[in-house]
Amino acid sequence: MKLPIALIAEDEEILALTLRKTLERLWPELSICAHAENGVEAVNHALKHCPDVIFLDIKMPGKTGLEVAEELAEEWPGDRPFPLIVFVTAYDEFAIAAFEHQACDYVLKPISDVRIAKTVQRLQSKLGDQQQRPLELEKMMAQLAQIVPTLSGAGTATTEKLTMIRAAVGNQIRMIPITDILYFEATDKYINVVTAEQSSLIRMSLRELLPQLDTSVFWQIHRSYIINTRYLHYATRDETGRLTVQLKGSSNKLQVSRVYAHLFKQM
């Protein structure tokens, strides 16, 4: 019988070491395949080792734990069971409520033996149920769709919504009405603001931008895209079940992440 393996993704070295030592005591059969110090390493190690369990710090440099989980959901090889995710977090009890009794587990900082023991018991039970393993990815996608806006602050009533975007077009700065924007596309350090006539740049992340948008109109459909649904022409599902959307005024087909596929259930 294959012994389970785990990846620890935690940028605080002492906490990562504490978690490793605690797991060695409480779950000696578990093998730690690697330790990632940031989100980019977490993705690379996970795709290389295909662990059964990943302990993901929510706040990491490079990529957050939520961004890592989203990316792995898209890139995970189809012939391997998706890993069980345990988020390591310092968030308060109100945010933690999003994790309770769902596919993703969590542990609070500072780590305690009692909480880790409970997590180990849950993980062992899920790993032992081979019939349920293929459903874990679907369950996690549904949960991430709820957790991401909860922890990013998207859709909160306290944030004033944008009506104009100040963006760079070449050497010029232009004011673009929010109603003219077809979609936002995340690049390395910028967001590409796309209208029917042109593209321009703003320096921020989609996670910073989303709380400033009316999320009844602007939908995040992928870790790289937020679309203006008023320009949504149609969505297409291919033979593998993957979705793409076509917007009026654009020839580009935009991929829909599994995390956000529920937005198109009726299509």
Image (cartoon, rainbow, N blue to C red):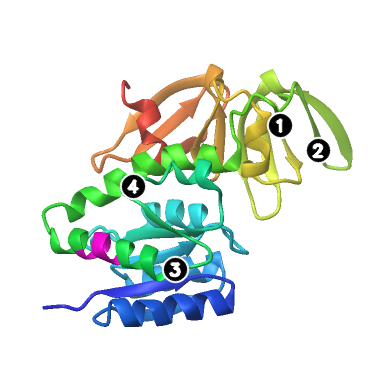
Crowd band around label 2 with a 10 angstrom C-alpha radius: few (<14), some (14–19), many (20+):
some
> SS at mark 2?
strand
Q: Main secondary structure of the magenta part?
A: helix
Where does residue 128 sit, x and y in percent of width and height?
Answer: 14, 63
Q: CA distance from mark 4 to mark 2?
A: 39 Å
Give the residue type that dot 4 points to.
Met
Give the residue type that dot 2 points to.
Val
Contact (Cβ within 8 Å) of mark 4 with mark 2: no
Which segment is the magenta one? 120-124
Check if residue 80 falls in the magenta segment.
Answer: no
Crowd band around label 3 with a 10 angstrom C-alpha radius: few (<14), some (14–19), many (20+):
few
**Residue behind mark 1:** 198
- Which quarter of the figure has residue 179? top right
Crowd band around label 4 with a 10 angstrom C-alpha radius: few (<14), some (14–19), many (20+):
many
Q: Is residue 120 left or right of residue 214?
A: left
Give the residue type that dot 3 points to.
Ser
The residue depicted at 39 percent of the width and 71 percent of the height is: 113
Residue in front for this viewpoint, 251 or 221: 221
**Residue behind mark 2:** 169
Q: CA distance from mark 3 to mark 2?
A: 52 Å
The residue depicted at 53 percent of the width and 63 percent of the height is: 109
**Residue behind mark 4:** 140
Query: Which numbered tag is attached to residue 180?
Result: none
Contact (Cβ within 8 Å) of mark 4 with mark 3: no
Mark 4 or 3: the one toward you? 3
Contact (Cβ within 8 Å) of mark 1 with mark 3: no
Quadrant containing the C terminus is: top left
Contact (Cβ within 8 Å) of mark 2 with mark 1: yes
Q: Is residue 255 visible?
A: no
**Residue behind mark 3:** 112
Q: Is residue 152 above or below residue 215?
A: below
